[in-house]
Image: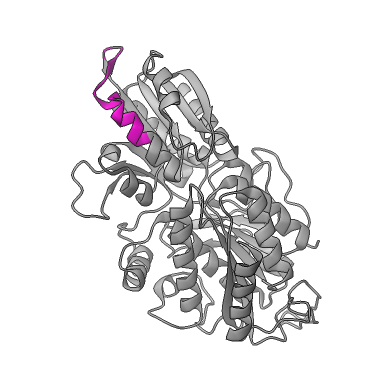
């Protein structure tokens, strides 16, 4: 986000009632809580009538579709926290101390930024939100490179980051931070959930060719699915890295056609997945026979938005998802109804993740009785909850990764509607995808920074 746009957003917050200090930062002050302790901290909103949250999403770049839906969800979450609208998942979330009167009685205001799907731009945008707009928490992203970069910034500056859509193992493994929390599942969990389904449907003696987005998410997704499928008998013919935002993937697909592989695994997301999948289908891979078997294509991380973009090319293609809008639980029903009423179409998994993250942060403040980050963090660590669309979920204390069930999904062969494009093939239980919190190394760091 450029300075002029940022200043416009900042002015809109000021106009709406956020009380900021002389330098544009909420002035720190001494906060007394019901727990009888006090502390000074950055952007303390105790003297203000409102608290300011930062929503930092990709509005440009290859993941812009996800970013737009994230921002819709963030706005809806703020509305519901302030007691406006139908309440959405505020009504189904449990255990919850949310009251519909903002956070700790302070109206929720927000500023927005464009990460551009670039780590440097995202970090700069988040830094401006903290230093100029006085945000007490920020959230968003659809790129794990962005998540890792801004999560590190959150730790440095002592402001909690509720990670948006980030699927790389690194986010809560080697690059974990005390001030970062992830609600979305990760690549390891995708691999453990998807591999047995692939083996059951396609056989245990397949030969796979990986095309992989060349950054932290793609690397860990490739590694996770490669390890999981090879443990069941598959062989990996090749793993080729592709640049983020490549657009034309034909130069990468041609070698796959002639490699002897009978499965193409597209470790791509957003518009990159749309383009690579459509181009692979245009190359005739779905009609190709190799090693006496029908050639198959796999997309390890799926989203409804990507299936909309890929159209017929996504039909029958297997992958995993964090959530889907037509799940039967009450939280999903409430959120889907509320989102569709607000925007005219159902929410994506990116939207559900960011909405849930906003509610989880707000509730942790209510639980702690303060905005003081160390106490809010402690309220989130080990927190077990339900009613946000993913079934029983736990924010593990050891790595700040949400542990929950994982969905294996498939593009519907005959979609009944414009938005009803994915079917849930299997709900894989948490027990089948869980791993030790110590896996991947990394240190959370201190509570006070």
266 to 84, vertically: above or below: above
Question: Is residue 54 in sight in this rendering?
Answer: yes
Indicate left or right for 123 with 291 as reference. right
Residue 233 seen in the figure: no
Residue 367 versus residue 439 in the image, above or below: below
The quarter of the rendered structure image containing the C terminus is: bottom right
Which quadrant would the N terminus be assigned to in this image? bottom right
Please give left or right for residue 58 compared with residue 126 in the image: left
x%, y% of residue 52?
A: 63, 75
- Farthest-out residue, front: 4
Tell how many labels: 0
Please report the bounds of the magenta region as a residue range: 277-292
Q: Where is residue 132 in the image (x, y as percent from the top left)?
A: 72, 71
Give the camera-side residue of 63 and 325. Answer: 63
Give residue 19's position: percent from left, percent from top.
68, 84
In the image, is residue 313 part of the stretch drawn in magenta? no
In the image, 256: left or right of 341?
Answer: right
Q: Nearer the viewer, residue 435 or 127?
A: 127
Q: Nearer the viewer, residue 274 or 159?
A: 274
Residue that appears at 34% across and 47% down: 309
- The residue drawn where x is 76% and y is 83% is 32
Way the structure is coloured: one colour
Q: Residue at x 36, y 26 (%)?
A: 199
Q: In this view, does 288 lie above or below 423?
A: above
Indicate yes or no whether the magenta region holds residue 281.
Answer: yes
Q: For residue 193, which quarter of the picture?
A: top left
| Residue 225 location (% of width, % of height) | 48, 31
């Amino acid at each position: 986000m450029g300075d002029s746009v940022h200043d416009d957003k900042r002015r809109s917050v000021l106009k709406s009632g956020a009380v900021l200090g002389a330098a544009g930062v909420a002035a720190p002050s001494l906060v007394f809580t019901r727990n009888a302790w006090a502390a000074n901290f950055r952007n303390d909103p105790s003297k203000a009538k409102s608290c300011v949250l930062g929503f930092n999403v990709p509005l440009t770049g290859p993941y812009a579709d996800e970013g737009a839906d994230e921002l819709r969800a963030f706005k809806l979450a703020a509305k519901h926290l302030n007691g406006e609208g139908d309440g959405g998942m505020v009504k189904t979330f449990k255990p919850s101390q949310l009251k519909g009167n903002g956070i700790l009685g302070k109206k929720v205001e927000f500023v927005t930024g464009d990460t551009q799907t670039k780590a440097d731009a995202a970090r700069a945008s988040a830094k401006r939100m903290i230093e100029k707009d006085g945000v007490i928490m920020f959230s968003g992203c659809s790129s794990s490179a962005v998540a890792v970069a801004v999560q590190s910034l959150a730790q440095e500056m002592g402001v909690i980051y509720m990670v948006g859509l980030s699927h790389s193992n690194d986010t809560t493994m080697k690059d974990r931070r005390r001030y970062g929390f992830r609600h979305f599942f990760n690549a390891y969990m995708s691999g453990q959930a998807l591999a047995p389904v692939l083996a059951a449907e396609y056989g245990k003696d397949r030969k796979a060719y990986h095309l992989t987005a060349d950054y932290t998410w793609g690397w860990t997704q490739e590694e996770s699915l490669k390890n999981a499928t090879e443990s069941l008998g598959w062989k990996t013919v090749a793993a080729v890295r592709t640049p983020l935002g490549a657009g034309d993937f034909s130069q990468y697909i041609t070698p796959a056609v002639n490699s002897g592989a009978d499965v193409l695994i597209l470790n791509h997301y957003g518009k990159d997945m749309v383009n690579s999948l459509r181009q692979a289908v245009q190359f005739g891979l779905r009609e190709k026979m190799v090693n006496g078997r029908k050639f198959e294509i796999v997309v390890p991380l799926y989203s409804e938005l990507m299936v909309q973009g890929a159209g017929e090319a996504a039909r029958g293609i297997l992958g995993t998802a964090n959530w889907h809008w037509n799940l039967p639980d009450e939280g999903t029903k409430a959120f889907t109804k509320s989102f569709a009423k607000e925007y005219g179409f159902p929410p994506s998994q990116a939207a559900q993740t960011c909405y849930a993250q906003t509610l989880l942060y707000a509730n942790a403040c209510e639980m702690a009785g303060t905005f003081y980050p160390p106490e809010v963090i402690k309220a989130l660590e080990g927190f077990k909850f339900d009613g946000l669309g993913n079934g029983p979920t736990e924010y593990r204390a050891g790595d700040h990764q949400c542990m929950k069930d994982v969905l294996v999904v498939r593009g519907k062969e005959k979609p009944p509607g414009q938005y009803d494009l994915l079917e849930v093939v299997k709900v894989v239980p948490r027990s089948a995808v869980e791993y030790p919190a110590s896996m991947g190394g990394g240190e959370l760091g201190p509570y006070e920074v």
